[in-house]
Image (tube, helix red, strand yellow):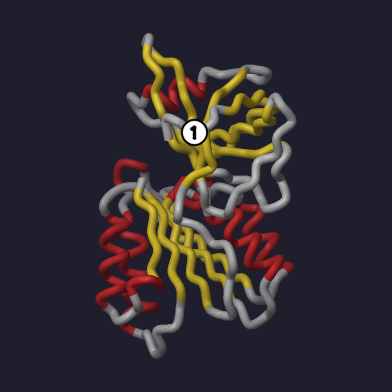
Amino acid sequence: MSSSPIFTATIEKIIERTSDTRSFFLRAVNGRKLSFLPGQFLSFLLPVGGETLTRAYTIASLPGEEACFEICLNQVDGGPGSSYLFSRKEADLLCFTGPWGNFVLNQPTAAEYIFIADRVGVVPFRPMIARLLTTSGHHTIARLLYAAPQVGDLLYNAEWQGWEGQCAHFSFRPLVVGCEPEEYSIEKVLVPYVEQHFVKEARQHSRRFYICGIGRSVLLLRDLLRGAGYERQAVKYEKW
C-alpha cells in the first residue's frame, strides 16, 4: 500500500452514534469521488507521537454516496489511532489510501444472505444490505442478526427498522443481552442463536453468510457454520 496514491479529505461532519462510537463524513479536497465496493475499507495515515500510524476503517456509506463518504469507528481503550481521530474536529484534514479489501458484496445472486454482526462489526453490512435491497429481486432474502450489550449500542438501529418495514425480503433481528460491556461475548449471544437456527435446524445449505465482529469468536462462528456443511466460500468473515 505504501506506493499507492495518497488522498486528502476534509472532515465535513462528525456524528456521535453511541458513547464510544462516531461517524466521520469526509470529502476529498480535490473533488474526487470515492468509488468503492460494499464492504471495503480505507487506510488512514495518522500522525501520532512523531510517527505515521496506518489504521483501516470500513466505509459506512451507502452505494451512491461517493462525494461525501462516511467511516464509523469506536474508540479503543489505549488505541492511539482511534484516540487521534476522536480528537479531530470539523474542517480538519485526513490522509488516506484505498479503498481496499476483499470482504465485499458486489454482484448479489438470488439467494438467502445472512449477515451476522457484533457491535461495530455491523458497519460493512450497511452498504452491503443496501446493495442487495436496491439491485436484487424478491428472490434474494437478506437477514441481519445484530448482537450488542445494550439497545443503545446498536448502530443505525432506526435505519434497520425502517428497511425492514419497507422491504418484505429483509428482516432485522437485534440480539441484545442487557449487560455491561465487560460481561458481553459473542459466545453468549450469537453462537447459541446460530447453532439453533442455522446448524441444528439447517434443512438446506444454499445460504450465504457474512460474519463481522471483534476477536476470535468470529472464527468460532465461521468454523461452526462450515462444520455444519455450508461451503467454505459461502461463509465469508472479517475479524477485527
Q: Residue furthest top?
A: 50
Q: In the picture provided, is 6 more to the left or to the right than 168?
A: left
Q: Residue furthest front?
A: 3
Q: Residue shown at 72%/50% (left/top)?
A: 64
Residue 197 location (% of width, % of height): 39, 78
Q: Is residue 173 above or below residue 66?
A: below
Q: Residue shown at 36%/43% (left/top)?
A: 180
The quadrant the N terminus occupies is top left
Q: Residue furthest bottom?
A: 203
Is label 1 in a helix, a strand or a loop? loop
Q: Is residue 120 above or below residue 212?
A: above
Q: How many marks?
A: 1
Residue 117, quarter of picture:
bottom left
Q: Residue shown at 25%/76% (left/top)?
A: 227
Q: In the picture provided, is 179 more to the left or to the right than 157?
A: left
Q: Residues within 10 Å of mark 1 (few under 14, many from 20)?
A: few
Residue 31 location (% of width, % of height): 74, 30
Instruction: Indicate the amino acid at tag 1.
Output: Ser
Residue 33 location (% of width, % of height): 70, 39
Residue highlighted by disc 1: 4
Residue 237 location (% of width, % of height): 38, 59
The quadrant the C terminus occupies is top left
Nearer to the camera, 139 or 122:
139
Nearer to the camera, 224 or 233:
233
Q: In the picture provided, is 183 more to the left or to the right than 159?
A: left
Q: Residue shown at 36%/26% (left/top)?
A: 79
